[in-house]
Image (spheres, rainbow, N blue to C red):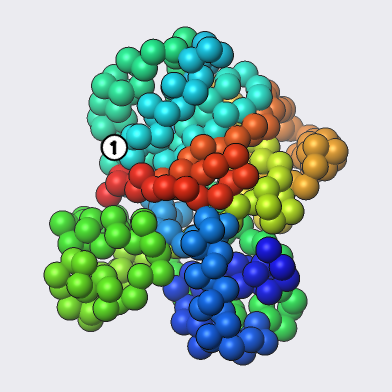
Amino acid sequence: MDELDLALVNALQLQPRASWVDLARPLGSTATTLARRWDRLSSAGLAWVTASFGREFSRSRCIAYVMIRSDPRERSHVVAELARCPEAATIEVATGGHDINCDVLTRDLRELDRFLTGKVYGVQGITSVSVLLTTSLYLEGSRWRLRSLDQGQLSVLAKGTMSLPRGQHAIDLDGLDRSLLEHLAHDGRLSWAELSGLTGTSTATARRRVGRLMSSGIVAFRCEIAHPLAGWPIQASLLAQAPAADLDRICQGLAAWPECRFVAAVTGAANIYSTFWVRDLGELQRLEARTSNSFPSLTVLDRMVALSTPKRMGHLSDAEGRRVGTVPISPW
């Protein structure tokens, strides 16, 4: 990926469904060139746009982190079985206290229990399972930025970015909403006309429904990238414990760091789960030192480095992080 490719991905992180015409001026290119670039990137699995959960998802639905120990001889089998499950949105093979970590999205705790009982506990090769539940979500992957644009480009793109209100009441989704989200999970840049044809509704209704889902905070669009090929090869996570009185301040502080991709307050002995993308393992060491200096009351309990990410938010990946297939999430 060259500089224009990275700038294009960065722009789509800010405006995942923007038209090529709208992106052409700030990127100093043409709509035709950008469309051609994106077709190449997405066809090669180097970048993609998808519908994902938004910042208000945890208020009305369930985000769990299922941490698994497995027999090393059965690990590939365990990963393959879990990857087939739409509930298992993201799967990492990692170092640390557990060798397989899954981000699990369900509608509620009962559905989580059915997933664990009916699908996880019966997988041959799993030797132990522990589960953390999200109590507050501070940062998720749709808000991580590549930082390939200059301030002028960012200013122009910010003018077209939708500002979404916080704290709206939970909304009920119907069959049309879920159909729209299923198609947008495969390809978050489907046009309104394409969505209309796929779901049997009008373009105006498709636009209105998707806008409603986004403004509720239940849904967000994200532009993903094969990060090992884009200069961010190391994904590391920290499980940490903080006093309850400091929890909100620390989570907000971590969420403001540019390396940070994900922060949640969780249940369990560890009450903070955070994920970072860094350029090398030395940077990870410096990051933990910075964490200790910035938040003295925080105690790191486990450090996990992803060896591979076979699945990320419903999209299957190869060893280099390229998308090779889709098992769309369906927690709606």
Q: Which amino acid does label 1 sit on?
A: Asp
Q: Residue at x 28, y 41 (%)?
A: 107
- Image quadrant holding the N terminus, namely bottom right
Please give the residue where the numbered disc 1 appears in the rendered image.
Answer: 108
* Residue 253, horizontal then vertical, whole percent: 68, 50
Residue 41 vertical position relative to residue 303 in the rendered view, above or below: below
Q: Residue at x 51, y 37 (%)?
A: 310
Residue 196 vertical position relative to residue 114 in the rendered view, above or below: below
Is 241 or 114 nearer to us in this picture? 114
Is 94 or 215 nearer to us in this picture? 94
Q: Which residue is drawn at 54% across and 67% down?
A: 40
Left or right of 109 in this view: 187: right
Left or right of 265 in this view: 207: left
Q: Hey, which quadrant is residue 55 in on the image?
A: bottom left
* Residue 178, horizontal then vertical, whole percent: 23, 56
* Residue 36, horizontal then vertical, whole percent: 53, 77
Q: Hey, which quadrant is residue 50 in on the image?
A: bottom left
Regarding residue 158, the answer to whether it shows in the image is: yes
Label 1: state its secondary structure: loop
The total number of labels drawn is 1
Q: Residue at x 44, y 14 (%)?
A: 126
Residue 71 vertical position relative to residue 204 in the rendered view, above or below: above
